[in-house]
Image (tube, rainbow, N blue to C red):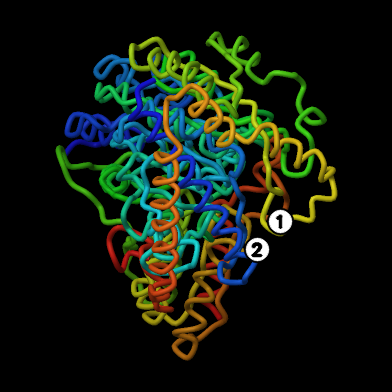
Amino acid sequence: MAVKQYIEAIRDALFEEMRRDERVFVLGEDVGVRGGVFRVTDGLYAEFGEYRALDFPLTESAIVGVAIGAAAAGMVPIAEIQFADFIMPAVNQIISEAAKFHYRSNGDWNCPIVIRAPYGGGIHGALYHSQSVEALFTHVPGLKIVTPATPYDAKGLLKAAIRDPDPVLFFEHKKLYRSIKAEVPEGDYTVPIGRAAVVREGTDLTVISYGYTLHLALEAAGELAKQGFEAEVLDLRTLRPLDESAILAAARKTGKVLIVHEDNKVCGVGAEVSAMIAEHALFDLDAPIRRLAGPEVPAMPFSPTLEKAYMLTAQKVYDAMLELARF
Amino acid sequence: MNKDTLLRWYRTMMRIRIFEETVNEKFLAGEIPGFVHLYIGEEAVATAVCSLLEESDYITSTHRGHGHTIAKGADVKRMMAELYGKRTGYCKGKGGSMHIADFGVGMLGANGVVGGGINLAAGAALASQLLGNGRIAVSFFGDGASNRGTFHEGLNLASVWRLPVVFVCENNQWSSTTPYRESTSVEDIAVRAAAYSMPGAVADGNDIFDVYEKAAQMTQRAREGGGPSLLEAKTYRIKGHFVGDPEKYRKREEVMEQLDRNDPIKRFVERVLEEGLLTSEDLTRIDHETLEEVSSAVAFAKESPFPEPTEAYEDLFVEAGAQ
């Protein structure tokens, strides 16, 4: 197996799916000649031409609107939103159109689009290039929300998203693009949407996370083992639909749950996971559910000291884990 | 214009008119729930434009969508059933008046959001271009939508890529309760086409012959790979913004004057009879058939069952159980 960066795994999925099915095409700002600002779509233009790596006007509502219309007329569009922060003008198209297509037609039509968007902070992007917007969409029935943390999952989940007949929002943590490398099998495979994965076995406490902070949890779990506490770590991978049975199993296994995400806490994904555990597994718990999340401020601040204060670190996750382990 | 086309036009306009007069009556009688926006007085636009389209061509519509839906060939029975909230309706009762769509006849949806369909039409046209299947798309929208971002986005990119799409702005003079002149920077919305390097034209939206003639040039241009165009059809919204609208923002005389002088169906009838193109027997026969057709649609809707409450939880995703 080849070792691939997270970004390479995503790019491989795009190439392979576009070769497999000529209806698949990519549209977005700078995705063609430039290959995307993060270079995710690099090379698509050369292989597939300008119509399948389509440079779009700077208008997100139209990127998504056109993707929906093209999907209705037989194509399989992959819309790139350059930064997840820029998705706001397209919210109307995503929530009012894409999420409702299948429902309003009683299954006569569907909306096989993928919307890819890099999210998250830690690269000095400040206010409009750092946001975690996933929870805004996890509230919406009719959408599927995917947030892979590893190269293997990124490739397999993107392929699954492209082949999925329903609208999928595919959020890529931009700090992972080049910082995470791992083995990825050559060739075709998919990872099912809606399934979480246990990425570390343990018996003393359970950490539930996704995206960039999953790696912080794994690093902290390694340190915590030196103190004699073994953490079970669950990667949600899909935020809607949540994998209820995996979440409840992981919670019941240790009786202590810490949920970690970069997005802020109030009404975040952790709130839903926490409620799910409280509703179904309260009497299996040995400690109150804990959440470690981004602060309740409206944006990621720019100054390095402020950004550092905002971002979670392995140390912050370790401290929270240790406190819970000792409860 | 051959006689078959004229008969087809008249049948379509009357089908829309009688359907909507009936809906108006049934809504006021409390039989139809929700919000209903009527197209009465604007029938010539959808009828003329859709008569230039194949079944496989695409349209997008608006919150005022019954006319477009009928003109594109949808079944009035399933439409009426949808308005009644019945499971035999186009959306099995999930959509109602504002959200009817029928992909089978290329009708990509009425739309509860002003300007919501413009980019969808551009997307369908892009797919036609990519697939090389020769289909074109038409987006119907109102004067109010022409002030929204999606209008400018859609026209710009359609022009850049020479998409096979015709943008049809139905200027019915009223953006909800505000006169378009008070909310729009231009007298003729068609002049905005120049900003996007495409042809723009104004048609008398209540003269079906004029709409047809101007739209024909635009659909032909789209089919020949010439790119998009903008047609502004000047018309008039006879009814309120919605059924039940108290209409305190305009004078009754203004509406009556339009109805008397500018009703598109009346103008059509006067012309075809005067020029001897159709006979009053032709028209009367269609009137009877259409009344019968709509009345059986009402009967169908009334007899149809409501959806089961559990159906509210169905059809979220293609794969059942994925929700």
Q: Specify whether disc 2 shares its chain with disc 1.
A: yes
The local secondary structure at tag 1 comes to loop
Q: Which residue lies under the disc numbered 2?
A: A266
Q: Quadrant of the N terminus of chain A?
A: top left
Q: Is residue B202 left or right of residue B163?
A: right
Q: Name the one closer to the observer, A294 or B58.
A: B58
Query: Which residue is drawn at the image coordinates 55% and 59% (left, top)?
Result: B23
Q: Name the one closer to the observer, A276 or A311.
A: A276
Q: Is residue B274 left or right of residue B56?
A: right
B98 shown above or below A300:
below
Give the letter of the chain under mark 1: A
Image x and y of residue A313, in percent: 56, 51
> Which labelled disc corresponds to residue A296?
1
A315 shown above or below A12:
below
The local secondary structure at tag 2 comes to loop
Residue at the farthest bottom position? A283
Image x and y of residue A52, in percent: 31, 23
Query: Which residue is drawn at the image coordinates 40% and 58% (left, top)?
Result: B292
User: The disc labelled 1 sits on which kind of residue?
Assistant: Glu
Image x and y of residue B164, in percent: 39, 20
Image quadrant in which you'd find residue A18: top left
- Is residue A299 in view from this perspective? yes
Of label 2 and label 1, which has the lower sequence position? 2
User: The disc labelled 2 sits on which kind of residue?
Assistant: Val
- Picture mark count: 2
Q: Are marks 2 and 1 in contact (CB under 8 Å)?
A: yes
Pointer 1: residues within 10 angstroms few (<14), some, or many (20+)?
A: few
Q: Name the one closer to the observer, A230 or A76.
A: A76
Task: Tell me the CA gap for discs 2 and 1.
Answer: 8 Å
